[in-house]
Every structure is written in structure tokens, then in C-alpha cells.
Image: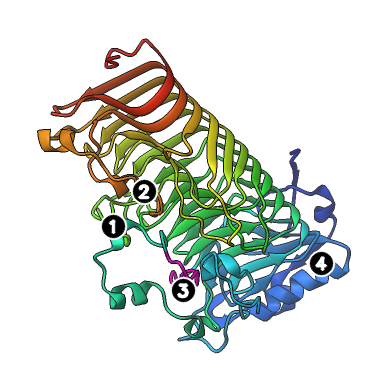
Amino acid sequence: MTLTRRQVGLGMAASVVPFPAHAAATFDVRDHGARGDGQRLDTAAFNAAIAAAARAGGGTVVIPTGRYLCFSIRLQSWVTLAFAQGAVIEAADPARHAGRYDLPEDRGEQLYQDFGHSHWHNSLFWGDGIEQAAIVGPGLIHGLGLTRDGPGARWKAQTGERPLSMRQMSAAEIAQLEPDVARMQGLGNKAIALRGGRDIRLSGFSMLRCGHFAILATGTRQLTIEDLAIDTDRDGIDLDCVQDVVVRRCRVNTPNDDAIVVKSSLALGERIAAERIAIRDCAVSGYDLGTMLDGRRSTTQQVAPDRDRVTGRIKLGTESNGGYRDITIEDCRFAHCRGLALETVDGGVMERIVARRLTMTDVTTAPLFLRIGDRRRGPASTGIGAIRDVRIAQITADGIDHRFAATIAGLASRPVENVALSDITLSYRGGGTADDAARRPGELAGAYPEPSMFGPTPAWGLWMRHARGVTIDRLHLATAGDARPAILADDVTAVTVRGTPAWRS
């Protein structure tokens, strides 16, 4: 992408406007009635300025310094929203302010993914089928009035709907996290939601406490997300059924859910693969909420709402009906969070995945987790998926929770295939017992995929079960002391090992 520097408003610092034609006409939200005092609603002014830019054939909507209280802001094609330094968009709260968010679309009964994935209009910013649109500049989106909650999937089987770590929760506790649909009317649960559309840029701003999703993009093509700082209640960046996407130089802190996650759900009513995605030079973490943005990076919180340790990782999954192809994750950093997870449990094929040059510190579950499952959350025609052609290289991880080895876990009927692990160094805290070494975890084919699903793994460094065509080259393992073997392979064939002292054939 070629970026052109333009002045986008009187008295504003130079901002990067990704579409040069948008710089030809500017529309100041103050000229359309915005006050920016944090007291009076500015929703109508924002939507009027955006509509005016769209009617003019495109332009830049200028958001000067101020605090703008808003309900749903409707993005349109050929319009860039440009934040000035010190501009804050605060999500209004229907319980305190006179208004509501746009209602969720009436799409009938959505069986196979949760409420949050199935709707887009009930958001602070939303765009439906838009083209050549952008939000840029050094402002802040503060989702103060958004909710992190929402109903779960209405899938009748319910197998694998929630992590096994939640099985001790009462119905009342789950209901607190998953209210019914009626309670969601008028609420907003996403900061930025995109359905379809193409050629969209999000760049340069910060996001704080943004509800269920800071960013949800579903079926979007040619999306670039860069230089964002996100510190939020639940999911950070969710890329569902997208193609040709780049996420780069973003910092995403999400102690309660995933930081950057690629999915391929049935939210659009059909199986669509997530393809040609690059996640580069990003940092993900599970620090206490708000303490990444303010620089404290506190680690008081140890447990996420799913009763497992804090989250904050990069993941492919869990929704995986359409599969994944040609995805690269490189030069990224993980801190005080779960490790890299590659999961397909709903019939999709995962292939041609590259993860390289990753560093991890204080890893709260397994550093690497590859899982084929048989949840099949989908129509009766849903089968079992596959993982093949995965290359993981130049990984360094330390301070790893001793309970969970790096794991490759397929099924007896569907092994993980053609995985190459090279130049990897993993250092564990230590503490596994002889009883842990004797464990033989159940297959748990239909369970929600998480490293903790199997309990403490019977090896401390690398545990493989049901895999074919695994190459291990220069895998270095260290522990502070553990009674389990370093590596254990069960039903693993066609293994090639080089430069790995812990391997015992």
C-alpha cells in the first residue's frame, strides 16, 4: 500500500490518508453540530458529516481534539475518518444516555456461532459492504458504554460449545456471561464491525475497553490494520472469513480472550475460507486490563472468565467451518499470555500455515498447540477437518507453565500431517510429577479446543499424538526440573529428527 501524507484539517498535524483522493475534500464534524464536550451526544453530527462526504463523491471527515459521546456511527464508502491528536470517541451507554445503538440485523435463528459474530450494526462504528474507507490518526476509541457479553450459539448439540475449564460453572454464572437476545436490544457490543466490503484501512489509533470485539471483520477483502494499540475487555482483532488481509505493528492486550484471532465461521451463511492473511510485527499480551496502554503492564489477574489462565494470544480457530489457507504469522511477541494456537474442529481444512520468528515470555498454557477435533458445530453435512503443511520456525519461549507441553494432537482417523518444527527453544518452569508422566489423556474429540483440555500432558516439552510426517530440526528444551519425559510421541509416523538432544527414538 502506498501512503500519501496530506493535511486533513485546519490546525491538525499531518495525518496519513491512505486514499489520496479523500484528501481533496474535508468535512469537520464541528461544522455538522458536534460539540466534543463528552456530555452531549454527537452521533447525529458524525453521521451527517460522513453522509456529506459520501454525497460529494468521497472525502475526509476531520475529528478535532475533544471527547465525542456517540452511539452507532455508520461508515460509508470513499470516506476517511481522521482523528486529530487528543480526539476521543466515547461509546455512549443506553443506561445513562438518551439513545441506543443500531439494532442487530434480523437474520433469523443463528445456530452455529454466537450472537456477537452474527451481527454487525449493533456497534460503535459499522460498515456494511463499504469500499475504500478508512479510520486513521492518533485518537482514542473508548468503548466505555459497550458490553462484553452476549448470547452463545443456539446449536442444539452444544457439544464443545464451551471450554472444559468452564464445566464447574453454575447456570447462573454462565447466564451472567451469556444473556439472552432480548437483553441485547439497543446495546452495542463491538467498537468496529465490518461486514463484507473491500479496500479498508484502520491505522494509528488506540482502543480501550471495547466490549465483545474491538474489531470484527467478516467476509472483508483487502483489509489493512496497522499501528493500533488495543487494550480491551474481550477479543481484540477478529478476522472471520476474510481474504487478503495484513495486520502489522499492532499491540493488542486482552487478558480475558484472544488478542488476534482468525476464524472461518458460518456467520455469512456459507463456508468461506480465511485466506492470504499476514500478521506481522505485532505484540500480544494478557496484562491487567488497561495497563498496556498506560505502560504499567501489571499481572495481578491470573485467571480468565473461562477459568483458565489469562488469554491474550494469536489463534486460528475456534470457529473453523470454512478452513484456513496461506496464513503467515511472523516477527510477533507474546507476553503473559497463552501461546500460538492452530485449531480446526468444525470441518475446515487448515493448510499452508507459516509461523516464524516468534518470542514468548511468561506463557500461561502451551507455547504451541495444534489440534484437529470433531466438534462439527455446523449443518449435518459438516465433516472432520484437517491440518497439513504447517511450518513453525525460529521460536523462543520461556517461563512456560509446566503443565502443558507444546502439543500436536490430531485424531486417530485424521492425523495432523506434514508439520515442520525448526530452530525452536522452549524453557519450562518445571514441576511435573511421576503421576503426570503416567497419565494418558482421553481423546476428547468433541471438546472445545484448549491446551488445558487434556490436563497436564504426559511429557513436559513436546507431546504428539496422531500425527504423520513430522520433521523436528534443532528443538531445544529446558526445564527447572520435571519427572516426565521431555518428548512423547503416540501414534506418530514418518518422523524425521535432527539436532534435538531430548529425542529418544
The Cα–Cα distance between marks 1 and 2, rounded to whole angstroms, is 9 Å
Asked if 375 appears above or below 109 in the picture, the reply is above
**Residue wearing tag 2:** 450
Q: Compute the Cα span from label 1 to label 4.
A: 49 Å
Q: Which residue is mark 1?
A: 165
Q: Which residue is mark 4?
A: 53
Secondary-structure class at tag 1:
helix
Q: Is residue 111 above or below residue 245?
A: below
Amino acid bearing label 3: Pro
Q: Looking at the image, do the residues carrying marks 4 and 2 touch, with CB atoms under 8 Å apart?
A: no
Residue 62 drawn at (x, y percent): 70, 63
Whether 361 is among the magenta residues is: no
> Disc 3 marks which residue?
151
Q: Mark 1 Cα within 10 Å, few/some/many (few <14, many 20+)?
A: some
In the rendered image, the vertical position of residue 42 relative to residue 57, given as above or below: below
Which label's residue is closer to the chain start, 3 or 1?
3
Instruction: Magenta stretch: give its range.
Output: 144-158
Q: Dividing the image into 4 quarters, which one contains the C terminus?
A: top left
Mark 4 and mark 2 lie on one chain; the one further toward the N terminus is 4
Q: Nearer the viewer, residue 90 or 350?
A: 350
| Towards the viewer: 381 or 285 | 381
Residue 146 falls within the magenta-colored stretch: yes
Amino acid type of the residue that numbered disc 2 sits on in the rendered structure:
Glu
Of pointers 2 and 3, the one earlier in the residue sequence: 3
- Quadrant containing the N terminus is top right
The tag on residue 58 is none
Which of the two residues, 84 or 77, is positioned nearer the viewer here? 77
- Give the SS element for disc 2: loop
Q: Are marks 1 and 2 in contact (CB under 8 Å)?
A: yes
